[in-house]
Image (cartoon, helix red, strand yellow):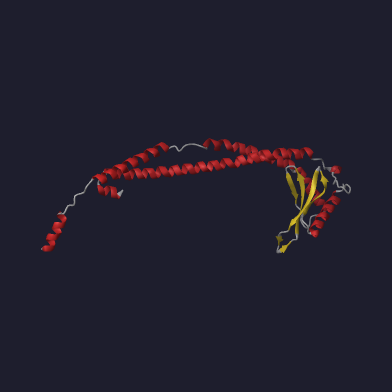
Amino acid sequence: MAKALASGDARLMHKAGLEADLARLERLAAAHYDDQFAVKRAIDWPEREIAGAERQIPLIEADIACRQPTKGDAFVLRRDKGDISEREKVGSWLLSQLRLAAKNGEAGVWNLGRIGGFAVMCEAGPGRRVRGEKRAVDVTLFVEACSGRIEIAVEDDTKGLGLTSRLEHALLRIDDALRDAIRMREEAQHRLPSYRARLGLPFAEQAMLDEKRAELKALEDDLAATATDEDPVHDDTEDREKEEEAAA
């Protein structure tokens, strides 16, 4: 702007003003396109949540449909070697199978029986380092369901009765999983319309931006043409004055 004022050419002052306007508009345009990208990402996430919930809900419903009661005397572990109906004995036997799998140190998956209509599985895999010691294998107890495995936490001090209690609660929590999946889908569906309404909106000042760019281009062309057409004449008055001063 200082250069434009010093030159006295109104076109240069106008050019400086146009460049300032363009810089502002281009910042706004960049912010708009950043917002559009953020909106697209915001839409992708609930869409994935909805798709995941819609895949999971029928599977959870199938689990609930095939689940058998375990309350009271209905509790039983069905095995090929014979059923066990006492909760403490069931838990103690399952714990013994987990310890045996850990002692053998072999990777694999075993079916230990069925409780409440679901297979109770034991899986042994490569061990992890725990408190400075590396285990030969890690052993996991889980219930195999249509909606995916339901892992049962087992600690070193877990007792037989406590383990069967965890198993029964895990089967009852399938209803919670269904409610959670339905709620997730509903919340995602509720968020989507507001995001979709913002997606694809044009930059509100695009016409002004295009106009300023065209105006600046025309002005720059005019200034370039003027500079080419002008043939500046060298004024040697100042040179003669300097020569006369030197001679004196």
Quarter of the rendering occupied by the C terminus: bottom left
- Judge from the rendering whether residue 154 lies leftward or rightward of residue 203; answer left or right: right
Q: Position of residue 98 (x, y in %)?
A: 80, 55
**Left or right for 87, reference 208:** right
- Number of on-image labels: 0
> In the rendered view, would you say 124 is above or below 209?
below
Most extreme residue toward the right, as rendered?
82
* Rendered position, 224 above or below 245: above
Report the residue at 35% width, 45% height from top. 19
Q: Position of residue 139 (x, y in %)?
A: 76, 55
Snapshot quadrant of residue 75: top right
Residue visible at 32% across and 45% down in the picture: 16
Which residue is nearer to you in this view: 80 or 84? 80
Q: Which of these two is toward me, 97 or 131?
A: 97
Residue 155 horizontal/vertical position (percent): 76, 56
Q: Is residue 154 left or right of residue 212?
A: right
Quadrant in the picture for residue 70: top right
Give whichever of 188, 200 is nearer the camera.
Answer: 200
**Quadrant housing residue 49:** top right
Image location (x, y in percent) of residue 210: 39, 38
